[in-house]
């Protein structure tokens, strides 16, 4: 092997031996003795030919999906880190699909993520391999490079998620968006919300001294084809619940209520870096939701940019107010397909835990495309229904609609019905990511922000470009 790697990872298929054994067969005895097994993620370590070798189980050949490869790669990275590896080389299994090669890179880079910006000193010196090399018989350069870009973008979104709200203010999120190369970015504050008539968004921002940010990002390459995609993200950088104050327990985790906005910002950055030939518009509504003498009260009635009057029954149902105006803004700017990403309801966590995000939408074909992108990236979604019976539940007594219903029934669905009022005839998909945005429990994203949605949105843009 002509690679300057101190550690080499080799996958073992069920019923198969070690491919390309070394030193006259130094590795196969580990398989024969049962120390190395094909059980997915089972690890064994050997030393031969002047290197360390990590033998890892892949399971049956026909079962090697992209998601399994991500999990396997994460397990190998963890072991390589323990071993003090500097350069890790993966021998890519023969005849795997390009997406599996990409998944190997994603799993490794996502597993390598660490957030230690606020540590006085590093917890340990061994941060894991500093370089990853993929050795393959086929040319997998394109999927590997693409995977590296989107994984790095997902990790950048995790940095935004994990940063505390005293540093990641709404305007700070806007500044991050403005740093991304290849995009046109506009950032507006309270005055801009007033100019656009965004009374619903502004109502959420009223309680905080922090300046809100309406962040608009554009990727408009000259060779673009297909419809203009509109990606809309909720970015409540801290959510106290407002006057409808949340319980103190676990309120610190409400810094993650900007996860949808982080996903949109960093997905646009990845799309620009990849140079995808598709037009993409990003609209992110960033604000804090705080109680104060200026805060919106339960019972207040506010107006969205299209004139819809909204009874605010619960100030902790604030994300849909922000998204209402952001969806209208994306439509006004010409979006022909819409996806919004939001940590919208606790009810979706009770429904799906940390396995699936909730998917709602108005167009079967568009929802199917979103679901397919999620399946490809391991960011799986499950579609839930909408319908007139649910829409009736959000009808207002004093205004057109209410932002929250009194009964604890169909809470995720009625929240989605609220958003549907602002999507018009544009094909739209809503992703409720409250259960998957953080502490996802995956081998490559166990604790903290997961960056969920970055890879899905980038893959959706890639597929739309054709």
Image (cartoon, rainbow, N blue to C red):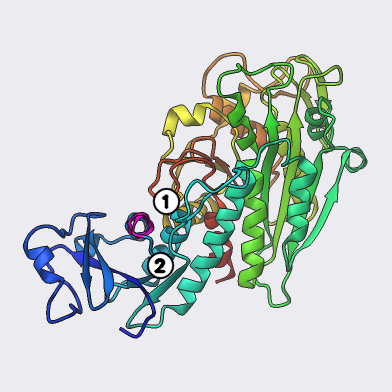
Quadrant of the image containing the C terminus: bottom right
Q: Is residue 182 visible?
A: yes
Question: Front-most of 25 and 348?
Answer: 25
Instruction: Identify the residue at horizontal 12%, vertical 82% (top origin).
Output: 24
**Secondary structure predominantly adopted by residues drawn in magenta:** helix
| Mark identifier at residue 444 | 1
Q: Is residue 3 above or below residue 163?
A: below
Residue 114 vs residue 117: left or right? left
Residue 97 percent coordinates (x, y): 35, 71
Q: Which residue is mark 2?
A: 99
State how far apart marks 1 and 2 are (Cα).
Answer: 17 Å
Residue 380 vs residue 300: left or right? left
Q: Toward which corner of the image does residue 372 lie, by quadrant? A: bottom left
Badge 1 marks a residue whose secondary structure is: loop
Q: Is residue 445 above or below residue 110?
A: above
Total numbered badges shown on the rendered structure: 2
Q: Is residue 410 above or below residue 48?
A: above
Q: Is residue 71 visible?
A: no
Local packing at callout 2 (Cα closer than 10 Å; few below 14, some 14-19, many 20+) is some
Badge 2 marks a residue whose secondary structure is: helix
Residue 155 percent coordinates (x, y): 56, 54
Question: Front-most of 24 and 441?
Answer: 24
Local packing at callout 1 (Cα closer than 10 Å; few below 14, some 14-19, many 20+) is many
Q: Earlier in the sequence, mark 1 or mark 2?
A: 2
Instruction: Identify the residue at horizontal 73%, vertical 40% (top origin).
Output: 167
Residue 304 percent coordinates (x, y): 81, 33
Instruction: Identify the residue at horizontal 42%, vertical 60% (top origin).
Output: 108
* Bounds of the magenta segment: 76-83
Q: Is residue 406 above or below residue 353?
A: above
């Amino acid at each position: 092997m002509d690679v300057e790697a101190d550690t080499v990872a080799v996958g073992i298929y069920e019923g198969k031996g070690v491919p390309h054994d070394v030193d006259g067969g130094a590795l196969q005895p580990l398989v024969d003795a049962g120390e190395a097994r094909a059980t997915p993620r089972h690890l064994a370590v050997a030393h031969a030919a002047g290197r360390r070798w990590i033998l890892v189980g892949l399971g049956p050949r026909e079962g090697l999906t992209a998601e399994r490869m991500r999990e396997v790669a994460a397990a190998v990275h963890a072991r390589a880190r323990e071993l003090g590896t500097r350069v890790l080389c993966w021998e890519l299994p023969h005849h795997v699909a390009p997406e599996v090669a990409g998944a190997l890179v994603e799993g490794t880079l996502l597993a390598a993520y660490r957030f230690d910006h606020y540590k006085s000193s590093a917890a340990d010196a061994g941060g894991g391999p500093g370089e990853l090399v993929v050795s393959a018989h086929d040319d997998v350069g394109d999927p590997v490079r693409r995977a590296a870009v989107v994984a790095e973008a997902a990790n950048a979104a995790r940095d935004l998620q994990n940063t505390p709200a005293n540093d990641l203010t709404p305007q700070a999120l806007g500044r991050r968006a403005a740093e991304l190369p290849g995009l046109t970015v506009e950032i507006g504050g309270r005055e801009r919300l007033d100019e656009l008539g965004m009374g619903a968004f502004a109502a959420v921002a009223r309680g905080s001294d922090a300046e809100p940010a309406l962040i608009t990002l554009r990727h408009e390459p000259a060779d673009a084809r297909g419809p203009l995609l509109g990606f809309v993200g909720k970015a409540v950088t801290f959510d106290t619940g407002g006057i409808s104050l949340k319980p103190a327990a676990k309120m610190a985790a409400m810094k993650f209520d900007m996860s949808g906005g982080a996903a949109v910002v960093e997905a646009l950055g990845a799309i620009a870096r990849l140079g995808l030939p598709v037009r993409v518009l990003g609209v992110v509504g960033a604000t804090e939701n705080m109680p104060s003498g200026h805060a919106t009260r339960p019972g207040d009635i506010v107006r969205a940019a299209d004139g819809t009057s909204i009874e605010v029954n619960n100030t902790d149902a604030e994300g849909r107010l922000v998204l209402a105006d952001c969806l209208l803004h994306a439509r006004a700017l010409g979006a022909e397909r819409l996806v919004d990403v939001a940590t919208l309801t606790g009810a979706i966590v009770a429904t799906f835990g940390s396995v699936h995000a909730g998917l709602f939408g108005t167009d079967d074909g568009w929802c199917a495309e979103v679901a397919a992108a999620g399946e490809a990236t391991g960011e799986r979604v499950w579609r839930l229904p909408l319908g007139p019976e649910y829409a009736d539940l959000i009808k207002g007594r004093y205004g057109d609609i209410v932002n929250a219903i009194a009964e604890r029934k169909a809470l995720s669905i009625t929240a989605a019905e609220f958003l549907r009022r602002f999507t018009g005839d544009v094909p739209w998909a809503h992703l409720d990511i409250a259960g998957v945005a953080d502490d996802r429990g995956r081998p490559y994203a166990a604790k903290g922000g997961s960056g969920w949605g970055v890879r899905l949105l980038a893959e959706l843009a890639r597929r739309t470009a054709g």
